[in-house]
Amino acid sequence: MKYLNRVGIALSILINVILGGASNQTFSARNWQWKKDKRFNLVCAIDLVLGKDHCAGCWINWQIRKPK
């Protein structure tokens, strides 16, 4: 299960980077940033599938880990 989780995170980062997102940021974290910026986002859909506050948690993790 841990392996599948890591593969899912890697795919999310890959999709985000292909779509022009920041390096090492998941698609979920990017969508949460868009929500904060009052831009179109998929937070409701992502959270519905992956669990309540998934995107917010991903964004917090990304803020902690991103290079300064």
Image (cartoon, grey):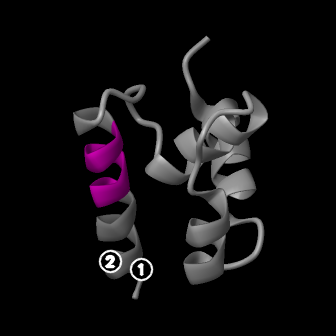
Residue placed under numbered mark 1 in the picture: 2
Up-down: is 6 above or below 4? Answer: above
> Which is nearer the eye, 10 or 49?
49
Per the model, the C-alpha gap separating discs 2 and 1 is 4 Å
Three-letter residue code for mark 1: Lys
Q: Element type at marker 1?
A: helix
Residue 20 is situated, as x and y percent measured from the top left of the image, at 32, 27
Residue shown at the point (35%, 68%) measured from the top left = 8
SS majority, magenta: helix
Question: Can you say whether 43 is above or below 36 in the image?
Answer: below
Residue at 74 percent of width and 53 percent of height: 56
Q: Residue at x 39, y 60 (%)?
A: 9
Q: From the viewer's perspective, is 53 left or right of 51?
A: right
Number of the label disc, if any, that sits on residue 3: 2
> Do the residues under discs 2 and 1 have CB atoms within 8 angstroms?
yes
- Tell me the element at label 2: helix
Question: Which mark, residue 51?
Answer: none
Q: Is 32 one of the magenta-colored residues? A: no
Residue 46 found in image quarter = bottom right
Report the front residue among 33 and 13.
33
Mark 1 surroundings within 10 Å by alpha-carbon count, few (fewer than 14), some (14 through 19), many (20 or more): few
Give the x, y percent position of residue 47: 65, 71
Tell me the residue at 76%/75% (across/down). Answer: 52
* 61 in relation to 22, above or below: below
Task: Mark 2: give few (<14), some (14-19) or many (20+) Cα within 10 Å.
Answer: few
- Left or right: 36 as drawn, with respect to 66: right
Left or right: 44 in relation to 27: right
Which corner quadrant holds the N terminus? Answer: bottom left
Which x, y percent locates residue 40? 59, 41
Name the spot of residue 15 as percent of width and height, x first. 28, 48
Read off the magenta span.
10-16
